[in-house]
Image (cartoon, rainbow, N blue to C red):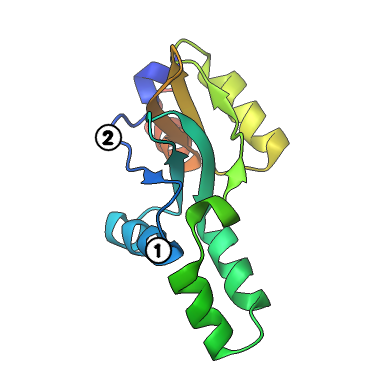
């Protein structure tokens, strides 16, 4: 099975200059645990996850420091740069192995330099449970 057959194509993203607060709101509203980070040309430049946000919040010294983090920190400052990507015609098994090896929960799908989808562990488990793979 190809990644294109299983990936989600309605992908929420966030700009590099948005606040951490905006990232948290977007993830909570969308019920997702990670967002692709895009530059002004909608090119994928990073990923920000709930793990990144929770780690930063836990490392803040006190409540005022957490408030500053939320209000004054941009997504660019906490994101993981250069996320792992695959093409839509990649095999799902290969994508799953890459996710397992890299210990990541999602892999972004790019075609001709543009973000076109995301494949998550949930998508793969759902396909296995539904006997699609």
- Number of labels in the image equals 2
Above or below, comparing residue 97 to residue 26 in the picture:
above
44, above or below 105, in the image: above
Disc assigned to residue 106: none
Mark 1 highlights which residue? Answer: 24
Could you tell me which residue is drawn at 61 percent across and 89 percent down?
A: 62
Residue 89 picture location, percent across and down: 46, 10
Residue in the image at 34% along x and 63% along y: 28
- 73 vs 118, nearest the viewer: 73
Q: Is residue 57 above or below residue 84?
A: below
- Label 1: few (<14), some (14–19) or many (≥20) C-alpha neighbours in 10 Å: many
- Confirm or deny contact between disc 1 and disc 2 (CB under 8 A): no
Query: Label 2, on which residue?
Result: 10
Indicate the secondary structure of the residue bearing disc 2.
Answer: loop
Categorize mark 2 by other alpha carbons within 10 Å: few (<14), some (14-19), many (20+): few
Q: Quadrant of residue 25?
A: bottom left
Q: Look at the image and tell me in which quarter the N terminus lies.
A: top left
Q: Which element type, helix, strand or loop, lies under badge 1?
A: helix
Mark positioned earlier in the residue sequence (1 or 2): 2
Task: Give x and y (percent) for residue 104.
Answer: 61, 42
The answer to whether any part of residue 51 appears in the image is yes
Mark 1 or mark 2: which is in front? 1
Query: Real-space Cα distance between discs 1 and 2?
Result: 18 Å
Q: Nearer the viewer, residue 24 or 103?
A: 24
Q: Is residue 51 left or right of residue 15?
A: right
Residue at the location (58% across, 59% down)?
A: 52
């Amino acid at each position: 099975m190809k990644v294109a057959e299983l990936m989600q194509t309605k992908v929420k993203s966030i700009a590099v200059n948005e606040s951490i607060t905006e990232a948290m709101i977007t993830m909570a509203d969308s019920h997702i645990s990670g967002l692709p980070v895009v530059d002004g040309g909608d090119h994928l430049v990073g990923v920000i996850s709930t793990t990144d946000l929770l780690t930063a919040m836990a490392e803040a010294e006190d409540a005022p420091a957490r408030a500053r983090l939320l209000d004054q920190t941009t997504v660019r400052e906490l994101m993981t740069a250069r996320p792992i990507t695959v093409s839509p015609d990649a095999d799902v098994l290969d994508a799953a192995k890459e996710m397992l090896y890299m210990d990541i929960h999602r892999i972004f799908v790019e075609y001709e330099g543009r973000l076109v989808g995301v494949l998550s562990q949930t998508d793969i488990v759902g396909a296995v449970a539904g006997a699609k793979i």
